[in-house]
Image (cartoon, rainbow, N blue to C red):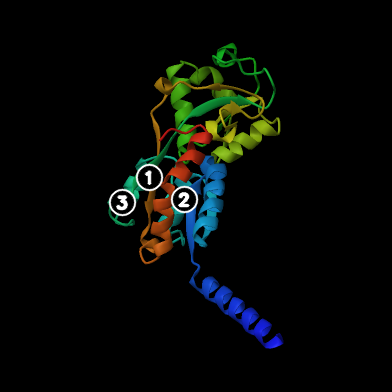
Amino acid sequence: MKTRLLRTLLSLAVGFAASSAFAGEVQIAVAANFTAPVQAIAADFEKDTGNKVVASFGATGQFYAQIKNGAPFEVFLAADDTTPAKLESEGMTVPGSRFTYATGALALWSAKEGYVDDKGEVLKKNQFTHLAIANPKAAPYGLAATQTLDKLGLTQAVASKIVEGQSISQAQQFIATGNAELGFVALSQIYKNGKITSGSAWIVPESLHEPIKQDAVILNKGKGNPVAKQFEDYLKGPKAAEVIRSFGYQL
């Protein structure tokens, strides 16, 4: 009996060691606006495949500079389509791996209930002290925010009130902590399963800014890693699509 039990335990241990040995991982760089969705997708991916996702979050422009300087990222999920295309033209990506994984939406948000009306009139009233946006040179959602202000003819009127975050996450933090009464964020940061999760918001019409197409691409450092391709394929699949839509993105 003891011998049989020992053999069973040994067999299980060998099996576990083998599965651990074959488990792989992929290093991904993710635009800050996609933090919550990719965390959910990565958890499903790890559960379904046994492979691990190691994610870093930040501004798309900052990631571009890091990738050019040799950062160890294997897959890049940007907040635009121009940065991955630029990396592609510079020969830094796996040919044919670039695709649009989501189209984002911009929102004007306040942590205060009832502060932002559903038509964004609060902007025109201009009775706030600080308006937070992401750095438009590094974060595509920051660029969309400046385009919106231009279209509304408010750029000069609010120029002295703008506070910039280096990423869309930092811009949201300024608002969440009360350092800015309101500001522009990615809808995905404040939206889940069909509703705004906190505060008050105006979903900015797409006509006020250029489409926020977000592209993913496998970088050269991921060329020899099958988990990089496996993760990108998973990102295209139905389970990931369900998560992406739940955060207010379009596919």
The image position of residue 131, as x and y in percent, is 60, 26
Total marks shown come to 3
The Cα atoms of the two marked residues, 1 and 2, are separated by 9 Å
Foreground of the two, 213 or 140: 213
- Name which residue lies at 50% across and 17% down: 154
Instruction: Say if residue 131 shows up in the picture.
Output: no
Q: Is residue 193 above or below residue 98?
A: above
Q: Earlier in the sequence, mark 1 or mark 2?
A: 2
The label on residue 65 is: none
- Name which residue lies at 60% across and 39% down: 170
Q: Is residue 21 above or below residue 149?
A: below
Q: For residue 181, what is the image quadrant?
A: top right
Q: Amino acid at mark 1?
A: Thr
Foreground of the two, 9 or 224: 9
The Cα atoms of the two marked residues, 3 and 2, are separated by 14 Å
Q: Decide: marks 1, 2 in contact (CB < 8 A)? A: yes
Q: Decide: marks 1, 3 in contact (CB < 8 A)? A: no
Q: Residue furthest front?
A: 1
The image position of residue 99, as x and y in percent, is 34, 45
Reading the image, the residue beneath label 1 is 83
Mark 1 nearby-residue class (10 Å; few <14, some 14–19, many ≥20):
many
Q: For residue 221, what is the image quadrant?
A: bottom left
Element assignment for label 1: helix
Reading the image, the residue beneath label 3 is 88
Q: For residue 81, what is the image quadrant?
A: top left
- Name which residue lies at 46% across and 55% down: 66
Q: Is residue 114 left or right of residue 232?
A: right
Reading the image, the residue beneath label 2 is 63
Q: Amino acid at mark 3?
A: Glu
